[in-house]
Image: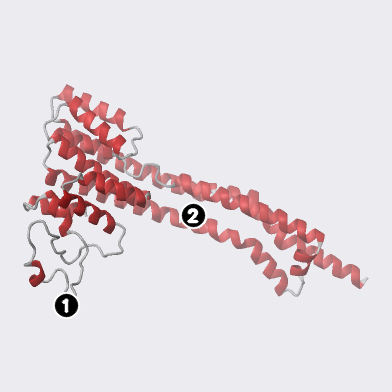
Amino acid sequence: MTQRIAVLLAAGVSPASAWAYLEPDVPDPGGRTAHSPTLKSKWRPGSRPWSSPGSPTPHSPGTQIIRAAADAGRRGDNIADAVAAEARTLGGQVGAAWLGLAAAWQVATQAGAPLAACLRQLASSFRQLGRLHADLAVALAGPSATARMVAFLPVVGVLFGSLLGFNTLQTLFFTPPGWACLVGGAALMLAADRWNRRLVHTARARDPTPGLELDLTAIAMTGGASVERARAVVDTAAERFALHRAESAAAIDRVLALSVRAGVPAAELLRSEADQLRRQAGSDGQHRAATLSVTLMIPLGVCVLPAFMLIGVLPLLITVLSSTVLVL
């Protein structure tokens, strides 16, 4: 989406109209699609430009954001604020990316940077972030599936006892020893579930947009702003749009100091450092995913296997012993 906006702006479309062109297709009462040449030729300045094929569907996550931005552009309101207001309702990685776009729009506008070029570079950063999160999701898929699968071990134990011909369900649900086993096993499985969820959550990406603040600083300096002015604009945008800042300030200080010593433009150095932060975030995520495969064995041994013994094995033994006593 950021790339599309950048292309429209580079082609001479005004910032206010660019968002309107990205609104979802809307059929007219005659049954024609919104992007047909006949309908498109009826557009007049100030009205909604008809969408082109490939625009977001009416039910895609970004549709409300695009509509809010287009409406803000038609009213002359702040587009960045409109995007941020809708992005906060999404949350997660998608919401963080939209907030990053809103911050970049605000920084470029305040610093006087060329909006089309800045958004084109930001689109490249977002593609890197998308690949980073996709790779991490793939790496976490195996450990997460393992955590879900082992939760069924106690149930498998109960079914196994029933298939052998022992009335373990009767023992488990209608005898005091069975109740004790059931309560203890359920408590252990609940603890294991929470433990697994916490481990998986810890292994996920800690910063949804690594390197974004460096990209924003590069955008501000592209507009010709001084270092102090660029830092002030970025700090204001980061607080305004609640961006995850992590340790970006220290990285920016290092890059700016290097720029002064070497006498080279800081913008390219900032973008290079942002790329490095994203690569490092990807490596760290892969390492956490590999570590998760091992750490998930801890709740398995401490909680799941004892729960399996309490729910699947011990009732079976009680049933066998009870049957033996009755026979004797």
Please name whichever residue, 39 or 269, is drawn nearer the observer in this view of the structure.
Answer: 39
Q: Residue 241 sits in which quadrant?
A: top left
Q: Quadrant of the N terminus?
A: bottom left
188 is higher (above) or lower (below) than 157: above
x and y percentages locating residue 296 in the rendered image: 55, 50
244 is higher (above) or lower (below) than 143: above
Q: Residue furthest right?
A: 328
| Residue 143, numbered circle | 2
Disc 2 marks a residue whose amino acid type is: Pro
Q: Name the residue under label 1.
A: 30
* SS under mark 1: loop
Residue 45 horizontal side relative to residue 53, left or right: left
x and y percentages locating residue 25 in the rendered image: 20, 67
x and y percentages locating residue 248 in the rendered image: 31, 33
Residue at 75%, 57% (x, y): give it: 181
| Mark 1 Cα shell of 10 Å, populated few (<14), some (14-19), many (≥20) | few
* SS under mark 2: helix
Residue 91 horizontal side relative to residue 16, left or right: right
Please name whichever residue, 113 or 313, is drawn nearer the observer in this view of the structure.
Answer: 113
Look at the image and tell me whether residue 132 can be seen.
Answer: no
230 is higher (above) or lower (below) than 169: above
Disc 1 marks a residue whose amino acid type is: Gly
